Amino acid sequence: DIQMTQSPSTLSASLGDRVTITCRASQSISSWLAWYQQKPGKAPNLLIYKASSLKSGVPSRFSGSGSGTEFTLTISSLQPDDFATYYCQQYNSYPWTFGQGTKVEIK
Amino acid sequence: QVQLQESGPGLVKPSETLSLTCTVSGGSISNYYWSWIRQPPGKGLEWLGHIYNSGITNYNPSLKSRVTMSVDTSKNQFSLKVTSVSAADTAVYYCARTNRDGYWGWFDPWGQGTLVTVSS
C-alpha cells in the first residue's frame, strides 16, 4: 500500500495567516492526489483533485501543488471557516489511501 | 445536485454482519463508481472499496475477505456488508461518489455518515 504522511499533524495559526500543509507519498503517485476538509461531526468535503484542480465553488484562497511524492495544500489567508482537519488522499493505485490528517487550530 | 444518504443499524453484535445501504438522489447511479469509506472515532479515513453500476468491484485487501458490495440500479442504491465484525469495525461509515479526471479516484459528494457501533 502507498503510505501518505502529512505534516504537521497540528497547526496553530491566526486569521489572515498563510498556511501550508505538506503531504508525502511513499512512492510516486504522479498527480493523482486529492485534498479534503473535514469539520467535527461532518463528512469530508472535497477541495482539490488531481493535485491542483480546485473544485467548483471552493474559495480561491485554497490551492494545491506538487507531483510525484511531495504535495502541498496552501490557504493564502486563513478565514474563520477554515479551522478544520485536512486530509490528502492518493488514487494512483489500489488501495486508495489517506494521510493521517492535519488539524488547523486557532492560535 | 446529487445527494447520498446512508441507512442501516447503528448497533451490531460482535461476530455478526454489518449491513448498510446508500441511497442516491438527484442523479443516476449509472456511469460512476460508488465508494464506502469509514472513520473510527477520533481517527483517520479508510477506503473500503467501490462498485460500478455494472457490479464491478474493487475492495481494500485489508478487509477483502469480509467485505461485499452490491448495487441495485432500479432503486438507485448500493450496499455494503462486512462479516464477522469486531470492536475494531466501530466507525462512522460514509458512502461517496467516486469521480475521475483521467484516473478514477476522488470522492464527491459524500453522505452525511452513519455511526456503527460493534458491541454486545
Image (spheres, coloured by chain):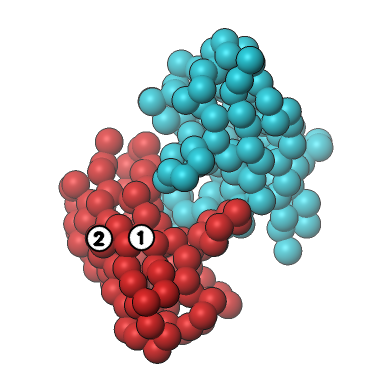
Chain colours: A red, B cyan
The image position of residue B49, as x and y in percent, is 49, 34
The image position of residue B109, as x and y in percent, is 61, 57
- Left or right of B33? Residue B73 is right
The chain identifier of the residue carrying mark 1 reads A
* Residue denoted by label 1: A102
Amino acid at dot 2: Ser
Residue A96 in which image quadrant = top left
Q: Residue at x 70, y 41 (%)?
A: B6
Q: Residue at x 73, y 28 (%)?
A: B9
Secondary element at image label 2: strand
In which quadrant of the rendered image does the N terminus of chain A lie?
A: top left
Residue B82 in which image quadrant = top right
From what the image shows, is residue A50 above or below residue A93?
Answer: below
Task: Say how many tags the image has.
Answer: 2
The reply to whether residue A23 is visible in this rendering is no
Q: Residue at x 37, y 37 (%)?
A: A95
Mark number for residue A7? 2
